Amino acid sequence: MKSVAMFNNKGGVGKTTLLCNLAACLSLAMNKRILVVDCDPQCNTTQLIMGEEFAASFYWDENHKDKPTTIADVLRPIHDGDSDISDSFAPIDQSKNRFGVDLIAGHPTLSFLEDKLSEAWTNVTAGDIGGYRRTNWARNLCEKYANAYDIVLFDVGPSLGALNRSVLLGCDNFVTPMGTDIFSILGIRNISQWLGEAIRAYEHGIARCEERSPGGFEKYGIPTRPSIANGFAGYTLNQYQTKSKGGERVATERYEEIIRKVPTEIEGLRGRYGRNGLSSPEAKLGDVPHLYSLIPLAQTRAAPIMTLAAKDGIVGSQYKMVENYREIVLNIATNFLRNIAGETAA
């Protein structure tokens, strides 16, 4: 099983849309067993997969019938001071959504865990085994489901905080969706510096931890070098939409200039964190087109874009857009599988 985080320090790059539609493609078209974990306190992934009606009822009604487990429930023991996650949780079954994925729903109170995970990180740097255990909660979660899924996809917000650090340090790989804007490039630089500092601090505390808790890493299955240190598995690039200003089309040169800068920035990320053997051309998973009305329609129907049909309100040229997107996401999924596991689609 592989665990993968979708992450960019820049928001608004279509990260959640890509994650959910990639997950659906992997499940519905490639027969992969997929678990999605919503670790963004905004819970956009949960709403997209389960629908607005579910989300409104689930998050507003405290007496919601058959209330499923959320990521906040999974992490409740850590919130309460323990070093392990809950043993009694079950994802929302794929039969309850159109994406064909199991889901651990997000929860707004997840943001309250930042202080606990920041404290755990301080303990990591001091060589405390409890800090390492709490920081590795995402790896612990994946290990509990090692035989149930092929891939676990984590959606996270754009922050460089303790929660996201713990998710990435607990994952095998990360993928970075990018927009055609300068802040996406700056986000790449921020990720590179932030992740490097996290890995160095993680490894710095190991010797002291071994002195204080001999055999602790083996006992709790904690890696001494996070997989994410060589876990960069690629990026996607949103195609820009030319805008109008004062009734005239804005020159596209500024967008093209940004696009020309992307390979250099990605090369730095690939060089530092790329999986062994990942080439520069392989790092690009694909371009994501501007989808205009398809995204809000898919959100309203709580459906993958590639499955939208007449019953969902598709009309006219939208049929061709859906077909084009299906081919694009299939290509991205194929490249994604190659990059995380060295495999090709069946």
Image (cartoon, rainbow, N blue to C red):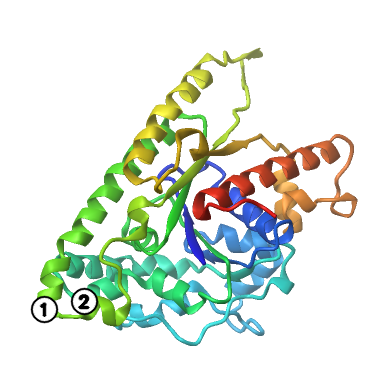
Give SS at disc 1. helix
Q: How crowded is mark 2: few (under 14 residues within 10 Å), some or many (20 or more)?
A: many
Give percent across and percent down for residue 61: 61, 77
**Which mark, residue 322?**
none
Q: Residues within 10 Å of mark 1 (few under 14, many from 20)?
A: few
The first of marks 1 and 2 along the sequence is 2
Q: Which of 329 and 221 is in front in this view?
A: 221
Give percent across and percent down for residue 72: 46, 74
Please say if the residues under marks 1 and 2 sit with CB atoms less than 8 Å apart. yes
Q: In which quarter of the image is the C terminus?
A: bottom right
* Residue occupied by mark 2: 129
Is residue 154 placed above or below 256 in the rendered structure? below
Residue 183 visible somewhere in the drawing: yes
Q: Name the outermost residue toward the bottom.
A: 88
Give SS at disc 2. helix
* Residue occupied by mark 1: 212
Residue 177 visible somewhere in the drawing: no
Query: In the image, is 88 to the left or to the right of 120?
Result: right
Is residue 122 placed above or below 331 in the rendered structure? below
What amino acid type is highlighted by mark number 1? Answer: Arg
User: How many numbered callouts?
Assistant: 2
Q: Residue at x 40, y 80 (%)?
A: 85
Is residue 25 placed above or below 314 in the rendered structure? below
Give percent across and percent down for residue 238: 58, 35
Query: In the image, is 115 to the left or to the right of 330?
Result: left
What amino acid type is highlighted by mark number 2? Answer: Ile
Q: Which residue is drawn at 30% across and 72% down?
A: 222
Q: Which residue is drawn at 25% across and 55% down?
A: 199
Q: Residue at x 54, y 62 (%)?
A: 43
Query: In the image, is 281 to the left or to the right of 226?
Result: right
Q: Nearer the viewer, residue 244 or 169?
A: 169
